Amino acid sequence: MSTVRLQEDSPATAEDGTQESIDQAAVFKQICDDLDADLFIYSGGITRGLASLFLNEVERPETRENVAVILCTLGGDPDAAYIIARFLKSHYKKFTLYIFGYCKSAGTLIALGADEIVMSHRGELGPLDVQLLKSDDILFRGSGLDITQAIVSLSERSYEVFEKHFLETIRRGGGAITTKTAADIASSLAVGLIAPITAQVDPLRVGEVERAINIAYEYGVRLNGDPARVNSIIKDYPSHSFVIDYEEAKSLFGNVRQPNEAEYQLEYLLRSFEENSGRMCKYLTISSAVYENAFSR
């Protein structure tokens, strides 16, 4: 890791196209003063190791009563996400979460623990389904709901096949075939069509998926206390990458608002710094008027 300090001023484009200068320290201090909060930024994957390093920063002597975290992540370990959220909630009176970009999967779990979510129109939450390594592939992960949805789909198709062949057998028999015989024929056909597919389902894998989903659910309920909301975030979306934008997040979470003027300036500063430097933040820790940035090499 290398440490880089932001320049005191950063250019911004005014409405007439001219360049203005934004006093970064003033923006940071105004947000901290408005919220009476220490301000931290976490950008990167959520793992136990990175969570520990992040919380080491948070454990430094607090100067404010509340905490605000700007989070940008594609997700990671739900255990680490739970630790982060619980730690912030236990060390501060109020936890405000800023979402200016991706905040997926385990990031959404942290969002469930926030007292207030400040989300720009570029912000994205995502479903809370777990990600598991695909069989025989250490580089790619699949949604934990894939297997569950596949089983539900097979069950529905099995019934459709049975129903179709049962009714067709009755119709073609012209009353000569009994209901029991028609049911036996339809069952044999349905089983014969579906069995080769269901034979490929690993019961141990199904158990692993159910356990992982239950972990996400239990963590979510402990952080938020609303089982229906947590269950919806886990199961009501068709894909792991599904975008939960500001409007949907507002109706789903309730405690969501848009950034004010100073917070929009902060979003601009962070985005322009990453674009100009070509480096993604690993951690950015800002406490009151003091700000220090640690970036990956």
Image (spheres, helix red, strand yellow):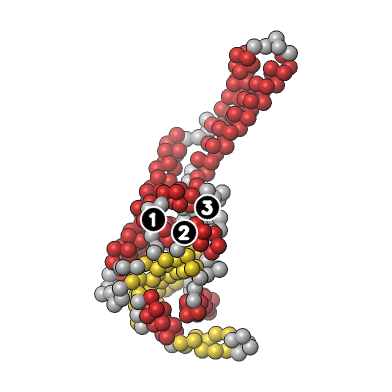
Q: Are marks 2 and 1 in contact (CB under 8 Å)?
A: no
Name the secondary structure under disc 2: helix
For mark 3, what is the residue? 240
Instruction: Estimate the x, y position of residue 13 in percent, counting from the top left.
Output: 58, 85
Disc 2 to disc 3, how far (Cα)? Answer: 18 Å
For mark 2, what is the residue? 253
190 w.r.t. 4: above or below? above
Residue located 55% across and 62% down the image? 247
Q: Quadrant of the N terminus?
A: bottom left
Residue 286 visible? The answer is: no
Instruction: Estimate the x, y position of residue 279 in percent, counting from the top left.
Output: 48, 73
Q: Earlier in the sequence, mark 2 or mark 3?
A: 3
Instruction: Estimate the x, y position of residue 18 in percent, counting from the top left.
Output: 60, 90
36 w.r.t. 140: above or below? below
Amino acid type at circle 2 is Phe
Instruction: Estimate the x, y position of residue 159 in percent, counting from the top left.
Output: 59, 29
For mark 1, what is the residue? 224
Name the secondary structure under disc 3: loop
